Amino acid sequence: MPRLAILSAGGDCPGINAVIRAVVRTANQQGWEVVGIRNGYRGAVENDYIVLGPNEIAGLLPRGGTMLGTDNRYDPASFPVEEDGRIVRKDMSAQVMANLEKLGVEGLIAIGGDGTMAVTRGLAERVGLKAICVPKTIDNDLPSTDQTFGFDTAVQTATDALDKLHTTAESHHRVMVLEVMGRYAGWIALYTGIAGGADVILIPEIPWDPDVVAQTILERRARGRMFSIVVVAEGALTPEGERVVQRTVPDSHEQVRLGGIGQVVGELIEEKTGIETRVTVLGHIQRGGSPSPYDRLLATQLGAYAAQLALEGKYGQLVALRQGKIQAVPLDQVETGIRTVPVDGPEVMAARAIGISFGDR
Ligand code: F6P
């Protein structure tokens, strides 16, 4: 039976399991077997795998996370290996190819973000890996696709949190600041802020002034609205134009982990308004849980299409959602970098029209 391999790498997000299920079902329907590589490219080097059949994927659709496990620190091009009691970095790309060949695998479907795409492209160029990439991230910041699966679920989770913060903010006449994820793009903050009825949304794309934020809150008070809700993207800059970094992760493709801007915003608001302010950092809750119906649908479409391309031997592609259609984009034409929020885009315009402040003048 011909075989395909699949792996997930980088940060997890709701919907990865739906892709795995769609790939396995599409392949099985056409007489192919799928091998799941565990823990991203680490498993590809270490030959850690599981054969995925109907029993392995049963009940997978509503499950968050990834049944294959993931890792965002391993690139076969610079893989940590123990030698004479020391850890040295070696190019293990040929090992990946040898392992796949041993498994009788014709090609690989790699589910991941920008880091995984870069690693996959590198393997294709260096050792001729035949691969198809499926983009994923809750951040929705990949330039190659109009929306990533995982984003809708993250926004749903964050909006639910904002609804809950609303009730306690109102009772205590407080300001509530919610810090959400999103790396260097403000998509999660923007969508959550609009969907959850925030008064102020602070995103990396729009520089903000604490006096403007304070004025918005005080004007609401003057109108008898005694509480306010502020959503801050983790990548929003401080008034001095700096990012707030929580920690760095050596060996990771993206070493900086953002976090802490919510506290900065909360303290400035309290200082400038005199109103009691509380800060909530939502964190990894945004990455967990069951995927929304939208994410299940998008993930299933991407998975089925990726499998179809692989079965036809059309490798070297990324599958993407573009203008409402699932399409293939050649891997060497995939844009790199971050898709940020357009500051004059329809969502920002609608938010401004209904009186949401972005803290700018
Ligand atoms: O890219 C997804 C994401 O959740 C970002 O929103 C966040 O900044 C980062 O990953 C957190 O990474 P980690 O799981 O390594 O803490």
Image (cartoon, rainbow, N blue to C red):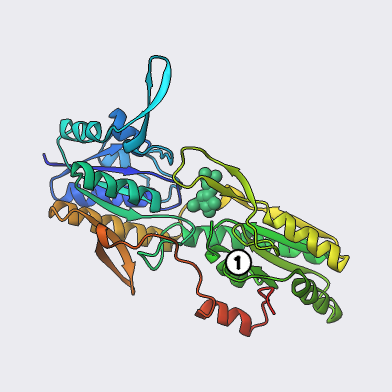
x%, y% of residue 9? 38, 44
Residue at the bottom extreme, as displayed = 353
Q: Is residue 210 left or right of residue 348?
A: right
Image-based side of 148 in relation to 51, left or right: right
Residue 308: x and y in percent read 19, 56
Q: Is residue 287 visible?
A: no
Q: Is residue 19 visible?
A: yes
The mark tally for this picture is: 1
As helix, strand or loop, the secondary structure at mark 1 comes to: loop
Query: Is 271 above or below relative to 248?
Result: below
- Horizontal relation, residue 171 to residue 284: left or right: right
Q: Which residue is mark 1?
A: 203
Q: Quick one: quadrant of the N terminus?
A: top left
Residue at 43% across / 41% down in the picture? 72
Q: Nearer the viewer, residue 249 or 289?
A: 249
| Quadrant position of the C terminus in the picture | bottom right
In the picture shown, does residue 40 fall above or below 23?
Answer: above
Camera-side residue of 109 and 162: 109
The x, y position of residue 305, in whole percent, is 24, 59
Q: Which residue reaches farthest top? A: 84
Q: Residues within 10 Å of mark 1 (few under 14, many from 20)?
A: many
* Residue plotted at (30% across, 31% down): 45
Q: Amino acid at mark 1?
A: Ile
Dot 1 beta carbon under 8 Å from ligand 1: no
- The residue at 79%/62% (across/down) is 268
- Could you tell me residue 42's position as x and y percent? 35, 34
Task: Tell which of 262 and 1 is nearer to you.
Answer: 262
In-image side of 186 versus 15 (left or right): right
